[in-house]
Amino acid sequence: MKTSLNTSRRVVPPAQLSADHVLVEKTKRRLTLFSDGEVIKRYKISLGREPVGAKMRSGDNRTPEGFYYIDYRIEDSDFHLALHISYPNEADSFRARQMGYSPGGSIMLHGLKNDDKEIAYYHGYFDWTKGCIAVTNAEIEEIWQLVPNGTSIEIRP
């Protein structure tokens, strides 16, 4: 019996892909990139120092939960590279105002802190950010290429 390999199928290198959705699962400490409903890549993440529960106000060290989008990027970030997440949305702002607080802001998907060699050893083993989502520097460089501005990001408990 003669068999042949189908060599017409092409594998697209990651640099040529573009994510259209980012899913963050806080409990699993996992970030997943999707394109047309298919998984492109998964990453282990660190979260805010108070990882349980949605961000309620400025300074609570929690990572938000809800639906947002990547609205801009920062090349000269204190954390290698950073993608800004559109937190707070209207519901977040309303909830914080009802409690008499500012909702906070500056929530990012970023790399490791510049000039902090210790964090590279601890990253992925404990939550160390002030509410942001952190990956390694190599990973944020890859995510930077794969995730355009305007990409939706869902952050689940």
Image (tube, rainbow, N blue to C red):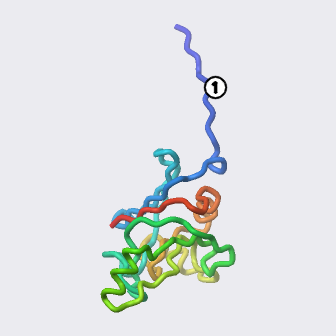
Query: Could you tell whether 47 is left or right of 110 in the image?
Result: left
Q: Residues within 10 Å of mark 1 (few under 14, many from 20)?
A: few
Whether residue 37 is situated above or below residue 146 in the rendered picture? above
Residue 47: quarter of image: bottom left
Query: Could you tell whether 27 is left or right of 107 in the image?
Result: left
Residue 112's x, y, as percent?
Answer: 57, 75
Task: Specify the farthest residue to the right.
Answer: 76
Task: Specify the farthest residue to the top.
Answer: 1
Between 31 and 94, the residue placed more toward the observer is: 94
At 37% from the left edge and 90% from the top edge, which residue is drawn?
101
- Pick the quarter of the image with the C terminus: bottom left
Number of marks? 1
At 60% from the left edge and 51% from the top edge, which residue is drawn?
18
Between 81 and 93, the residue placed more toward the observer is: 93
Assign a secondary structure to mark 1.
loop
Residue 65's x, y, as percent?
Answer: 37, 70
Query: Could you tell whether 142 is left or right of 56 in the image?
Result: right
Between 102 and 6, the residue placed more toward the observer is: 102
Task: Specify the farthest residue to the bottom.
Answer: 100
Residue 109's x, y, as percent?
Answer: 53, 70
Whether residue 115 is situated above or below residue 5 in the rendered picture? below
Whether residue 80 is situated above or below residue 38 in the rendered picture? below
At 58% from the left edge and 58% from the top edge, which residue is drawn?
147
At 59% from the left edge and 22% from the top edge, which residue is drawn?
6
Between 29 and 20, the residue placed more toward the observer is: 20
Query: Could you tell whether 14 is left or right of 89 in the image?
Result: right
Three-letter amino acid code at disc 1? Ser
Write down the residue under mark 1.
Answer: 8
Residue 89's x, y, as percent?
Answer: 43, 73
